[in-house]
Image (cartoon, helix red, strand yellow):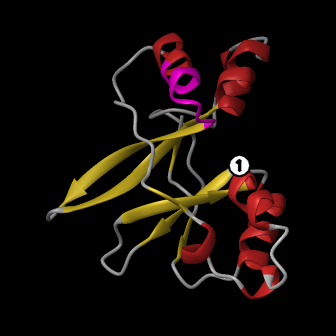
Amino acid sequence: MTIGVPTCKLDAPVADIARFLIDNNVEEMVVLGDEGEGVGVVGYEELVSAYHRENIRELTAEQVMREGVPELPSDIPLTVAAQMMKDKKIRVAYMNHNSAGIIYPAAMISYRHIVRHLAAKDESELKDLGLAAERKS
């Protein structure tokens, strides 16, 4: 799990989103509504699905996003999270936070996290993940 979630506004150009995903090695980002709430996601799946459109570079996050933000509880074992993601056919899930009635994504888990956990030789290779992750200041 990674604390902090990549986000964009509804009017973010899809080319900028694509560049962010590639540059930051993330699968998708959450699209935020006017109040900062998560309203959808844009990732590889949505960008590839929209790629055939003649005006692809003129489109915005709002025009290509998948509505809703897939959520998992933060207190479940990794094995359960993996199975739930597989069952829901999602590669990224979010843990949300409620602040003053606005629900926004605060953390995320992805297939990449699960595969990294499997590949890790020891816990030192996972220091950037979870609640105890080393933070950039």
Q: Residue 4: x, y in percent? A: 50, 53
> In the rendered structure, does residue 28 fall within the stretch colored magenta?
no
Q: Is residue 104 above or below residue 77?
A: below
Point out the residue furthest to the left here. Answer: 100
Q: Is residue 80 above or below residue 37?
A: above
Q: Quadrant of the C terminus?
A: bottom right
Could you say whether the residue bearing mark 1 is in a helix, strand or loop? loop
Residue extent of the magenta highlight? 84-91
Three-letter amino acid code at disc 1?
Glu
User: Badge 1 local density, few (<14 within 10 Å), some, or many (20+)?
Assistant: some
Q: Main secondary structure of the magenta part?
A: helix
* Nearest to the observer: residue 21 or residue 66: 66
Q: Label 1 belongs to which residue? A: 27
| Residue 137, visible in the rendered structure | no
Q: Residue at x 80, y 75 (%)?
A: 53
Q: Residue at x 71, y 32 (%)?
A: 112
